[in-house]
Image (cartoon, grey):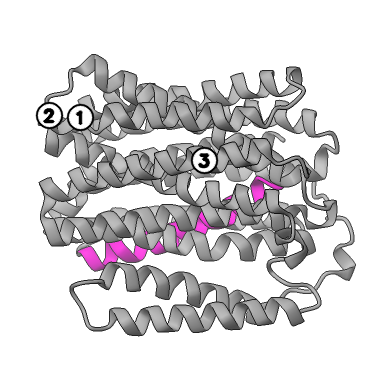
Amino acid sequence: MTGVYAVLLLLGLETTLGGAILPQAAQTLNGIELFGWLGTFQMLAAACMTPVTARLGDIWRRKWLVFASVVLLIVAGTIAAAATSMEVLLASRIINGIAIGMMAGAAFAVPVDVFSDPSQRVRWQSLSGVMFAVSSSMGPILGALLIELFGWRFALLAVPVACLPVLCVLLSMPDMQPRQASKQRFDLPGAVYLSLFIGSSLFGLQSLGKSQSAAGYLLVAVLSLYLFWGQQRRAEQPILALEILQNLQVKLIALSTLVSGAVLSVLLFYSPLLLTTLTGMSFRDAGLAMLPMLIGMPTGSVINGFLFRKLSRPRMLFCVGAVTLFCGMAILVFIPYGLPISGLMAGYALCGLGLGFINQNQSVFIQIVTPRQFAGAATGLVSTVRSYGGALGSAALSLALLTAGLHQGLIIGLLISLGCALLVIPITVRIFLDESA
């Protein structure tokens, strides 16, 4: 598990460090109007790679998939630091998204190989949340500090440098063979159809109202989804085991993950730009303002892990997280109207606590309600849907920025996030009321 924790530390640092540095990089490269594409391309690549890697993890050893993801992260960071145009920076974020998708698809399924008891998994995943928070909380402040001292190019090299000791830790990680690996087959056509659906649907959303190609993208999305579904029914070892989706709990968990993923992406990736634009904060002050959320996420995860073992019906923790997230977003929508710093930090803290509850329960319950042989695919489903939800949120915000301008677009993004947070509540209530798990 040490190797997994090292990767989570790295993942947390990358997630928040990039959000703090990339706005200034985009301004320097005269591409601030394309800033939204940085997040969309990254999340698009992550959403495509997560299910592929999760399925490969059920066939091959997850250790080497995680190792490859760290190597790709080094490549992406190096290219970004050397970028001379916005196009090169966009390309680096695609590689970065591939690396993040591989991490999410492989690393988060390792506890299933190690622990058979769900309560043990919750305990270790709570500790994982703490690890993620330590690095996440460092990201915005470290990014702003490195920019002020050395510039954004040097700041982007922080992650590649941090990757080097992580690679050494991964080399000592046990090389565990997945159960029934010899019987598994990889569904390549399914992976292609799924990637086509994810990519075309996101490009179609971002093209709405400003390009005639939107209808073509959406048509490709519908066709590829139809082909993907048919392939999953025929494939001997599909990317997405349809047996999983026969369970109502899985459908509800996936839907909650999709919606909360959109909120998470806006808060993590766009908050530095949002705060500096709407309040006039410096990037360093924006990083400090986000700190309660970054601390609140692992705190919520730890509290959730403790209560999970105490409650007879722990699914109610879903509802607690959803209501807390909505309360936080209801405060943050007042950012454009002079929200005091105390209210700002309280809003971020509540959002962090709510997401800590929600994210952990999504990962734990999806593993509980699915057969063990589909553990990787089930974990990958959560990670994929979360990435896709994040990409949808990013695409919607990018569309708002391009059509309404920077200031109004960010306000629209806050309202979209509030609506998504509200939608999570009835979904989680339905999860709590359902008795099939």
- Asked whether residue 407 is in view, the answer is yes
Left or right side of 304 for 81 = left
Left or right side of 382 for 26 = left
Which residue has dot 1 on it? 334
Q: Residue at x 84, y 51 (%)?
A: 372
Q: Secondary structure at mark 2?
A: helix
353 magenta-colored: no
Closer mark to the observer between disc 3 and disc 2: 3
Q: Which stretch appears magenta?
A: 86-109
Crowdedness near tag 1: few (<14), some (14–19) or many (≥20) residues, C-alpha within 10 Å: some
Which residue has dot 3 on it? 426
Crowdedness near tag 3: few (<14), some (14–19) or many (≥20) residues, C-alpha within 10 Å: some
Q: Is residue 426 above or below residue 325?
A: below
Which residue is more in the foreground, 153 or 63? 63
- Mark 2–mark 1 CB contact (< 8 Å): yes
Left or right side of 270 for 247 = right
Q: Is residue 263 above or below residue 96?
A: above
| Residue 168, x across and y down, in percent | 63, 42
Identified by mark 3, the residue type is Pro
Point out which mark residue 337 bears: 2
Q: Secondary structure at mark 3?
A: helix
